[in-house]
Image: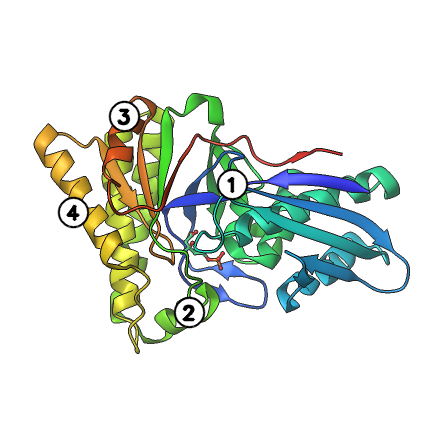
Amino acid sequence: MVKAIATPNIALVKYWGKKDGQNMLPMNNSISLTLDEQLKCIADAEFADEQDEFVVNGKPANADAYRVLEYVRKTFDTKKYFKIISDTYFPVAGGLASSAAGFAAIAFSIAKLLGEEEGIELTITEISMIARMGSGSACRSVLGGAVEWLAGNSDETSYAVQLVPFEEIGLVDVIGILSHEEKKISSRAGMQQTVKTSKLYLERMKTVGKRLDIVRKALKEGDYETVLIEAMKDSDNMHACMMDTKPPLSYLNEKSLETIKRVNMLNEREGRIVCGYTFDAGPNAHIITESKNAAEAEKLFAGIADEIIVSEIGKGPRKIL
Ligand code: PMV
């Protein structure tokens, strides 16, 4: 049996839409930071006798999870069945995307099992492709530091690469838990609807390439003001595309909007960009800032966050057994 741990990631330039749902190919590249092990998923993988067994957080797994196992058999030419048990260990229940950490841990544990027991050694690129089949953004969580998912145009060309290792990034993600509710519309269904109905999304597709170039360069150079400015713009743009979807999608709540206001006020008061907010498909706020400003960022959540997690940049998955 193999046990592996993986962590979520927060996207600075977001993925919201697929060009190929079958192969899980995104419309655009995306860039994220992998988070530390305060938020973690642990997956156990072993071979099963006659059929796959898959349990996620104590419940039978969904079709996406089984698709991952089919993909592994087809792609790496094995007839093995798997028994997978995956659990999420987040300080709070619900509200924080856990599928990225979950599928990264699952992909990593399967890869190590195949290596140890069958002599099938998988590269990190291949592990990223396995994770992608479970949940798109999971393909970025198989690496630490700053990571880019290359959209590609086929199964073998869509995977994540590391841009900057974790120890070279001086940023933290100060996460404010603003709601414990599970989202009502899944990312998968929501993004499909956006691609189908939003005119603004067409504009996004014209400009996202330029933003990726700017953020990639700024991360490599440690130009964090630029990173934060672009991360805020990209979050605003993705949420505007969500609102432009028919019927409109809105994942933010009053407290999310209050966070945006407070971040802007702080930056204005300081006359420079100290903090940058970003939101995925949910109301919980991620304030990205340099490590030295973490306490300042935490104060912004006064009276609105149920819990605050200050996450450093993570190293990526590892085998723990
Ligand atoms: O990987 P999914 O299907 O959970 O989609 C996640 C999309 C966002 O979190 C909203 C953005 C991103 O790039 O992580």
Q: Position of residue 154 (x, y in %)?
A: 57, 58
Disc 4 residue: CB within 8 Å of ligand 1: no
Q: Quadrant of the C terminus?
A: top right
**Contact, CB < 8 Å: mark 2 with mark 4?**
no
Res 60 visible:
yes
Q: Quadrant of the N terminus?
A: top right
Lower position in the chain sequence, tag 1 or tag 3:
1
Residue beneath label 4, please? 261
Q: Spatial distance from mark 3 to mark 2, Cα to Cα?
A: 34 Å
In this rendering, is residue 274 above or below 52? above
Label 2 neighbourhood size at 10 Å, few (<14), some (14-19), many (20+)? few
Label 3 neighbourhood size at 10 Å, few (<14), some (14-19), many (20+)? some
Residue beneath label 1, please? 39
Q: Nearer the viewer, residue 256 or 281?
A: 256
At mark 4, the secondary structure is helix
Lower position in the chain sequence, tag 4 or tag 1:
1
**Contact, CB < 8 Å: mark 4 with mark 3?**
no
Q: Spatial distance from mark 2 to mark 4, Cα to Cα?
A: 25 Å
Question: Which color scheme does this rendered protein use?
Answer: rainbow
Q: Residue at x 16, y 47 (%)?
A: 261
Q: Which mark is residue 184?
A: 2
At mark 2, the secondary structure is loop
